Image (tube, helix red, strand yellow):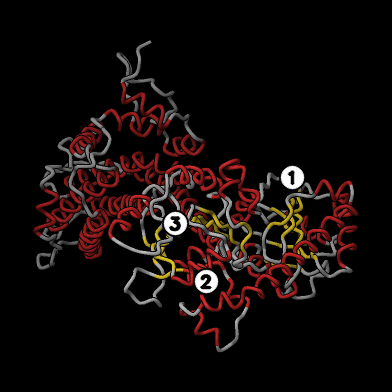
Amino acid sequence: MESLPENEVMTEELSVQLLTDDEQEQRMEMGVSDQGEGEGEGEGSERISLFDRSQNEIMKLIFAVNYRVPDEGHASFDVHAIFSTSQKIIKDSTKIIHNIIEQGSGFNDVETPKASSSFCTLINSFGCKMSCKSPGNENAFESRTEEILTKLSSYPCEVHVVLALAVFALEYEECSGQLSKKSTSLKRQDAVVELNNLVNQALQVIEHILELERLISGDRDSEPKLARVIMDTPFYAYWSIITLVACATELSLLTSDEDIKSYDLSHFSHKMGFILNKFEGQLTICQQEKEEVRAKKELWKLVCTAPPKITEVFQRLVLFKHKAYPQPPIISVNPTNKEVFNINVLEGKWVLFYISSLDNVSDQDISCLKEVYEGIEKHNKCVIVWIPVVEDWTGGGKEQFKEWRSKMPWYAVQYFSRTVIGYLEQRWNFKGNPMVVVMNRKGTVAIGNIIDLIRTQATEAIALLNVEIQKEIREEEEHSAWFGTTAAAIALLFAEIPEARECRAKGLSRTLAEAVVVLKSLTRPQPFTNTDATPVLLDGSNKQVNIDNELKWKDMFLLLSDVGIEDCYISYLKPVYEGIRRYPSYRIVWVPVVEQWNQDKEKQLEMSRLKMPWYTLKCFPTKPGIKYMKEKWNYKGKPAVVVMTSAGMVKNKNAFPLIKKNGMDAFPFFK
C-alpha cells in the first residue's frame, strides 16, 4: 500500500473522521450517491462528484493544493474592512438587479455602484478571476478554486475567503451594470433570484468565519470547543469560495449575448444551507464557551480580591452572577422557601458547605448532617449550606432538587453556576462525590473535606468545629493584644503615609494594621521625592503594578536584605515561591533595606532584582521604619523573611532557617 504524501498525512491527523449523520442526511436530501471514501478516482473509475465527498475528502483536497503554513512575513490585511467593503458592493449591486426583476426591463439611467480605485488596485493585484470559461462544468469550478487557493496559499484561511469575496464583488459590480442596461427574460430572472439567494448564504458563512476569528485567543486549552471549530474553518472557506466561483460563472452566463443554458445552482444552495445551519450552531456554542471563560476569570479575580470576611467571600463565590448564566443563583432559607435570604445572617458565622450532585445525595448523609446541624445550631456559630452540583436544571432536575430540599432544614443554593463548580473542582478538589468543606468567618477554608468524619462520628465533627472556632477566637484576642502594645509604634510609622491623615480624626482603628498599610508605613519612594507618594511595586517581569491591587488582603513573605543579597538566599526562597504560586492570597515581596544610598547601591539593586521572580518594593525604608524593623522584627542586616498575615500580624520574624532546612515543605508553617 502506497504511503500518503506528507500534506495528506497532515490532513489525516487534523481531520480523520467518517461521515456524520448530518452529512449522510444532507446527501440523501441532495439526491447524491453514497460512495465510500477514496473510491471513484482511480484509473477506470468515475470522478466522485464534488457534492458526494465527505468533509475529510475536501480537507485532503485543500491541503493538497499547494497549501502551506501561513507565512508570518506576508503583508497584513484588515479582513474586516475588506469584508465590509465587499459586502456593501454586493448589496448595492443586488438592489440594481432586484429593480430589474421588479420592472422586467433594464435601466439605462440607473446609477451603478463603484468600488474605490484603491480597493480595485489591491484586489486586482492578486490576479485572481472568479468566473470560469466552461459553463456548467463542475470540474471547472474546482480548478478555478484550486487556482485561487494556490495564489493565496501563504495567507491565513480568513484572508483566503475575504480576498476571494472581494474579487467576486468586483465582478458582481461589473455584471450588475451590464444587466441594468439590457432587458432579461423571465427565465433568467428566476436564475438571478436563485443566484442572489446563494450569494447571501455565502456572505453569511464568510461573516461567521470572521466572527470566529474574533473569538480566537492565545489560550486554546481553555476553549476546546472553539479550537475544534477552528479546525473546520478551511472546509467552510473552501465551500464559500467555490460557491462564489459558481455564482460568478452564472453571472457571466446571464450577461452573455449567447443563448446558453444557466447552470443549476440548487446543489450549491443545499450545501451552503447545510453548512450555514451547522456553522451557526457551532458559533453559538463557541460564543457561550467564550463567555464562560470570561466568567471564570472574573470569578477568580473577585474571590482573590475579596476582603477577609465570610459575607464578602460568600457573596462573590456562591452568589456569583454573570451574563454567561441567564439564571442567577438563589438561596432557599428552609424547605418551605417562604423566607427571603439575607446574607447578613452569615456575619461572624462559620459555614459548612455540603456539596453533592442530585444523584449521590443520600438520606444517610442528611441524617448525619442533621445531627451536626442540631449540635451547632444552639451555639449560633455555624450554618450549613447545601450546594447541589447540577449541569442541567431542565427536565427532572428541578423536581429532584425539590424532593431532597424538603428533607433539609438548612440553606440550599439553586442554579449554582458552572463556573463556580469549576472553581470548587480546582480549589476544593471536588471530584463529584459528596463532601463537606468548612469555611471560617474570614471566608477561608479552615477544614477540608470532613464528610467521612460526619458519617462515622458526628459528635467528633461537632467537637472539631468547636475547637477550631475557639482557636480562631484566641488568635483574634492575641492579635488585639499585639495591636494594643504596638499601636504607638505603628501610629508613628503611619504619620508618613496618606491613609493615616484620614484615620487620625477617627482614631487609630484596627484596619490600620493591614499588611499593605504597614508595608507602606515602613517605606518611601526614591530619596528627594514626595514622601507622601505611593511606593513603587514591580512584579517579576519588571512591570510597575498597583500596590493596593496586588497586596491588599494578602498574606506576605517580606524578604528584608541589603541590595547586594547573596544568590544562595534567593535560591532558598524560590521553592517556596513556586509552592505559593498556587495560592492567590499569598505574596513574596523583596524590601531592600538601604540606610545610605548611592549609585553603586542602585546598580546592585537592579542586578539582584533581575534574579527574583517575585515582587520588589522599589523604595527605601525610612529611618523610623528601619528602627522599627530592628527593634520589633530583630532585623540585624542579614537577609530575613518576615511572615505577615493580611491583617498585619507577624507570624514569624525570620523564616529563613525553616526555608533553608525544609525548602518547599516549610510552606505549611505559614498557615
Q: Residue furthest bottom?
A: 505
Instruction: Kindly tell me whether residue 325 is visible in this rendering.
Output: no
Q: Looking at the image, tell me whether mark 3 or mark 2 is earlier in sequence order.
A: 2
State yes or no: discs 1 and 3 in contact (Cβ < 8 Å): no
Q: Position of residue 531 (x, y in %)?
A: 39, 76
SS class, disc 3: strand
SS class, disc 2: helix
Which residue type does callout 1 highlight?
Answer: Asn
Which residue type does callout 3 highlight?
Answer: Tyr
Mark 3 to mark 2: distance in Å? 16 Å
- Residue at screen point 51% across, 43% down: 572
Q: Position of residue 670 (x, y in %)?
A: 63, 53
State yes or no: discs 3 and 2 in contact (Cβ < 8 Å): no
- Residue at screen point 36% across, 27% down: 10
Q: Looking at the image, tell me whether mark 1 or mark 2 is earlier in sequence order.
A: 1
- Which residue corresponds to mark 3? 615
